[in-house]
Amino acid sequence: MHLHLSTEHPPGGVAIAPPPAVQDSVPPPRAGHAWVPGYWDWRNGHHVWVSGHWVPARQGCHWRRHRWILRGDRWFLEPGGWVLDERVPAVERAEARARVAGGS
């Protein structure tokens, strides 16, 4: 599992647990888009809420939300991202895998 460590995230994680998630109001669905839920990021030494938003959908994929993972007594942010949807046929998964790898 890859844990996100941006330049603002200390290499050893952070000692402060993220606050409870903020309940974003999700706007009406947008055709061809996927909702990326909001999450707590670590910036300038404290947690900062990043609001949810719409992104262009990727056929054969779904969005995995950002999440904080506790390891020992330190918290690490695992970034969200596109995940292949195993419920679609193998040919479509292969095409989706190529799109994810290509960043489109």
Image: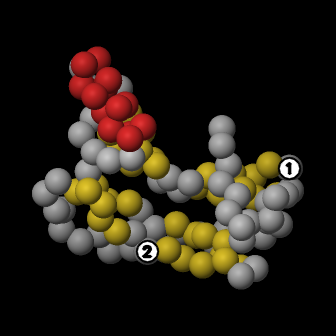
- Residue kind at label 2, given as amino acid type: Ser
Q: Position of residue 66 (x, y in %)?
A: 53, 56
Residue 49 quadrant: bottom right
Question: Whole-percent x and y of residue 35?
Answer: 31, 59
In the picture, residue 14 is in which quadrant?
bottom right
What label sits on residue 8 in the rendered view?
none
| Residue 93 seen in render | yes
Vertical order, 101 against 90 (above or below): below
Placement of 16 over or under 77, stated as above or below? below
Q: Which residue has dot 2 on it? A: 51
* Amino acid type, mark 1: Gly
Q: Position of residue 40 (x, y in %)?
A: 58, 69
Kindly identify the residue that appears in the image at 33 percent across and 38 percent down. 99
Per the image, label 2 sits on a secondary structure element best described as: loop
Q: Nearer the viewer, mark 1 or mark 2?
A: 2
Q: Is 4 displayed left or right of 32 in the figure?
A: right
1 left or right, relative to 92: right
Can residue 23 be seen? no
Quadrant showing the N terminus: top right
Q: Residue at x 71, y 67 (%)?
A: 7
Instruction: From the viewer's side, name the closer residue of 6 and 85.
Output: 6
Residue under the point 26% across and 56% down:
56
Q: Separation of disc 1 and disc 2 at Cα?
A: 28 Å
Q: Which residue is mark 1?
A: 72
